[in-house]
């Protein structure tokens, strides 16, 4: 069942603005509304220590009152900070077009929130790196891998800066996730008018050629004139090279497949591509 809703996750990091622009682009092409979530985790939540309760013998009532006020002020500031992030995000998305935007402020674990709310959306947009991550290439957002592993919806991973998308590269290995991605593209307004290329990394076989031809036929039925490429080499190297050399603005790939694109752990093809790719990545389950 479709909800015509996009879930966008923002945390106030440098990637949040890109998340908002990508969310507006996706929602605008699909005619969806956007629900923006900001989840206050442990680092953003009020100090959980009960400072007032830590004082026992000899404590003056005035000091107890001051500590209680401090606890309350911290909680208030955390809430205000969260609301400010949501208000800014809403303004960015609404500034990109006539899009209905709702905001949600939550406290707790981000992945648990996504798991609980993902059925209210058709796609999830998240930044490649979060507020706590450095900008070094080897670091990903601490929750990103967990979100992709746990979510049953497509996950769109925004890179640092938004660029209008005109071409999409599809990592194709013939597995269930790749076939699902092809079917999704053929039916989605998001890809309408985009140039689509299917690339297989590895040795060409009759089975792979037939799978590619079938995928092209599926896309053609959906109005796409897709190209195919077969490149020898390791998927993480081939996909990165083709994406950069051909100037593709988006990579589409399955989180799991029957080849090496099957495990989502540090060092796997999927994680390596998310880490190193300089364009947004749409992950299909």
Image (cartoon, helix red, strand yellow):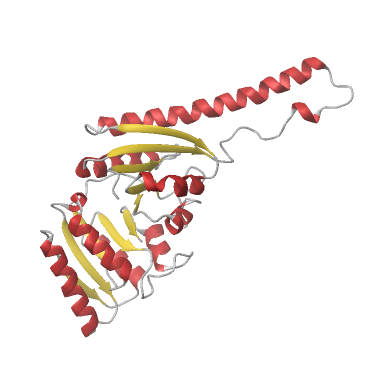
The picture quadrant where one finds residue 213 is bottom left
On the picture, is 78 further left or further right than 96?
right
Identify which residue is drawn at 46% across, 49% down: 115
Q: Residue furthest front?
A: 1
Identify which residue is drawn at 45% across, 56% down: 150
**How many numbered discs sit on the rendered protein?**
0
Image quadrant containing the C terminus: bottom left
Q: Position of residue 149 (x, y in %)?
A: 45, 59
Q: Position of residue 69 (x, y in %)?
A: 67, 20
Tell which of 127 and 107 is nearer to you.
107
The picture quadrant where one finds residue 221 is bottom left
Tell which of 135 and 103 is nearer to you.
103
Residue 133 visible in rendering: no
Q: Position of residue 136 (x, y in %)?
A: 46, 52
Identify which residue is drawn at 32% across, 48% down: 122
On the picture, is 206 further left or further right than 233?
left
Tell which of 56 and 138 is nearer to you.
56
Q: Position of residue 199 (x, y in %)?
A: 24, 69
Relative to 8, does residue 257 appear above or below in the rendering? below
Residue 168 visible in rendering: yes
Q: Residue furthest top?
A: 62
On the picture, is 143 further left or further right than 123?
right
Relative to 150, does residue 162 appear above or below in the rendering? above
Q: Residue furthest right?
A: 57
């Amino acid at each position: 069942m479709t909800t015509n809703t996009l879930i966008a996750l923002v945390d106030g990091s440098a990637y949040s603005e890109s998340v908002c622009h990508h969310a507006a682009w996706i929602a605008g092409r699909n005619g969806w509304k956007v629900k923006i979530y900001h989840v206050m985790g442990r680092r953003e939540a009020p100090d959980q220590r009960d400072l007032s309760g830590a004082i026992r013998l000899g404590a003056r009532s005035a000091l107890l009152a001051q500590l209680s006020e401090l606890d309350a002020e911290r909680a208030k500031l955390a809430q205000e900070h969260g609301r400010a992030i949501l208000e800014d995000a809403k303004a960015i998305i609404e500034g990109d077009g006539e899009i209905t935007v709702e905001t949600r402020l939550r406290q707790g674990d981000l992945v648990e929130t996504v798991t609980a709310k993902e059925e209210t959306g058709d796609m999830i947009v998240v930044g490649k790196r979060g507020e706590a991550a450095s900008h070094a290439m080897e670091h990903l957002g601490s929750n990103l891998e967990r979100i992709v592993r746990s979510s049953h919806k497509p996950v769109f991973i925004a890179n640092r800066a938004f660029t209008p998308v005109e071409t999409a590269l599809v990592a194709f290995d013939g597995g269930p996730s790749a076939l699902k991605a092809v079917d999704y593209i053929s039916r989605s307004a998001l890809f309408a008018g985009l140039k689509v290329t299917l690339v297989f990394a590895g040795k060409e076989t009759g089975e792979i050629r037939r799978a590619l031809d079938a995928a092209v036929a599926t896309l053609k039925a959906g109005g796409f004139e897709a190209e195919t490429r077969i490149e020898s080499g390791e998927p993480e190297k081939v996909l990165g090279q083709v994406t950069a050399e051909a100037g593709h603005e988006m990579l589409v790939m399955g989180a799991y497949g029957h080849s090496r694109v099957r495990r989502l752990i540090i060092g796997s093809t999927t994680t390596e591509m998310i880490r190193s790719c300089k364009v947004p990545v749409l992950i299909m389950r």
